[in-house]
Image (cartoon, helix red, strand yellow):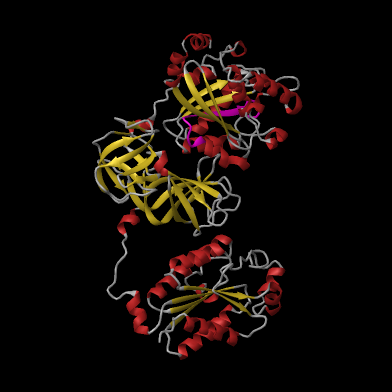
Amino acid sequence: MRLTDDLIATDIAAYLEKHENKSLLRFITCGSVDDGKSTLIGRLLYDSKMIFEDQLASLEADSRKVGTQGENIDFALLVDGLAAEREQGITIDVAYRFFATDKRKFIVADTPGHEQYTRNMATGASTADVAILMIDARKGILTQTRRHAFITTLLGIRRLVLAVNKMDLVDYDETIFNDIVDDFYAFADELATDLEIQPIPMSALAGVNITNRSNETDWYDGPALMEYLENVPVGDRRLNTAFRMPVQWVNRPNLDFRGFSGQIASGTIKPGDRVKSMPSGKQSTIERIVTADGDLPEAIAGQSVTLTLADEIDASRGDAIVTADDPTEVSDQFQVRLLWMNEAPLLPGRRYLLKIGAKTVTATVNAPKYGIDVNTLSDVPAKTLELNQIGVTTISLDQPITFDPYDVNRNLGGFILIDRMSNDTVGLGLIDFALRRASNIHWQSMDVDRNALAEQKGQKPAVLWFTGLSGSGKSTIANALQKRLFALGKHTFSLDGDNVRHGLNRDLGFTDADRVENIRRVANVAKLMSDAGLITLVSFISPFRAERRMARNMMADGEFIEIHVDTPLDVAEQRDVKGLYKKARAGEIKNFTGISSPYEAPENPELRIDTVNRNPDDAAEEILDYLKEHGFLGV
């Protein structure tokens, strides 16, 4: 630091230029809880003299008040900033810190070790070049150690520091260190063939092997941690791949300017280069590379720019500008690796929002092909994914997107899943490849379309979706209505929950995941019947709003009519025509709606039928009047 101090004092401009041209390394600390991650980063900040005097005074005061090291400085407090973190002595959120040495600049992410906060760890790892995997020398390799190692390699990190910490608590025993290293290498053989591992024995609290090699481990001949971090190759792999820029904004300040703004995800670009707009595939040539500081002769990965093109082509937010001779792929079906990040399990068949870059689409996640055991890295059967579980599955989107496999391009191959109701991020996914069937299967247009079929029948297609508790009277009302429609000469079909489970859905049970799949199949059948011009009566409990919304979105505008057969639980239970409530109360039926499984009542149904104060015939007449009033029954 002496040379840096002298340069600041004598030539500040030269110092700033030198500092600006330093390489930047992004790394994370990860591992199991209480292995010393925050302490290590605090020590790095302290030893690199990146703490101001007022910060140091505050740190010393906080160490005496809430620290865990007695009268000594508790370095973990430099990054554990949340009140809950200081109270519990743990890391909860990801903390990012910047520091620099004479050789290099660093951005470090301190990630939590608790299994509960694995999703936060994955967030920090998604942009890192190096992972420091902390291991408590007293405990060795734990399940969370393996999970974090697997996630870092899953997310593309190929340089890993195996930091065996707290060596001072085992008297710097070389045998203990070697045993931990051997155990990890045996595990790491299955992680990635190109993984580079650097084991380092250390004590973050005592500063052993942090900035310099220490005499306490004279048997160790490798680098100190800071020596490794300063010299590990950083080369930005994004520069050596094809040009990609997701469009974040179509920049149109006036009639004379139209550009496409975004951050370059990979590759380089210069005026005159041929590019394509994906997924449309339209080609053009780069005319200008515009920035706030003027036009550039060339732009590279990581820069945020606005590109103007020689031709007027269609591109909007979420599309990508890519090199013309090596474009991205386009598909709407993929195999993906998925890390589930929500306490509620994955429900196969449910629709989630998928966000990839600036593009947000609706995705249906299918049942996992298999889960992955983080201890053995072996495939295990899985019908769903629980919190922090990793699995391989397939997804289908409501529209094609442009992408690269994650192993080729992180930015265009990584995505998150968002719950449509809560807006919570529930999953992190990596695209492996597009499914072949996505390009082999095409929609076959028919000369006799749905409008012609409906006109022939003298009616408008409709899907009457009866939802309510078991025993509410859904099937009874639907039956009464169908008889009236038949008498009027209308063409109908009825899909009843019990009847469908005798055939199409006989393989499904009554778990939440099975209920989601049950409705997904029925909604697709109802859609086909709607295309045939029929008035379709669907009588299912369909307990979840998300699946009823999914069914609604599949139909043409105004065609889906949600009918809430509203019967209080106590009334439905008193009726108990099939004796199901009695069995459910006795524990003989699991996952019974209203008893051991939730029912989410419609918020804005087209019709609400009160079956406490009216009989099925009156209810059928009310629905019939609605159909007449809205023109579904023709002239």
The outermost residue toward the bottom is 487
Q: In this picture, which residue range is highlighted in magenta?
A: 125-139
Residue 224 seen from this side: yes
Residue 144, image x, y percentages: 59, 37
> Is 130 in front, or is 635?
635
Residue at position x 46%, y 30% in the image = 129
Residue at position x 59%, y 17% in the image = 47
Residue 398, image x, y percentages: 41, 58
Asked if residue 30 is positioned above or below residue 398 in the image, the reply reads above
**Going by the image, does 412 lie left or right of 494?**
left
> Is 603 in front, or is 251?
251
Residue at position x 61%, y 41% in the image = 117
Asked if residue 71 is positioned above or below residue 85 in the image, the reply reads above
Residue 507 seen from this side: no
The image quadrant that residue 581 belongs to is bottom right
Magenta stretch holds residue 396: no
Q: Quadrant of the C terminus?
A: bottom left
Tally of marks: 0
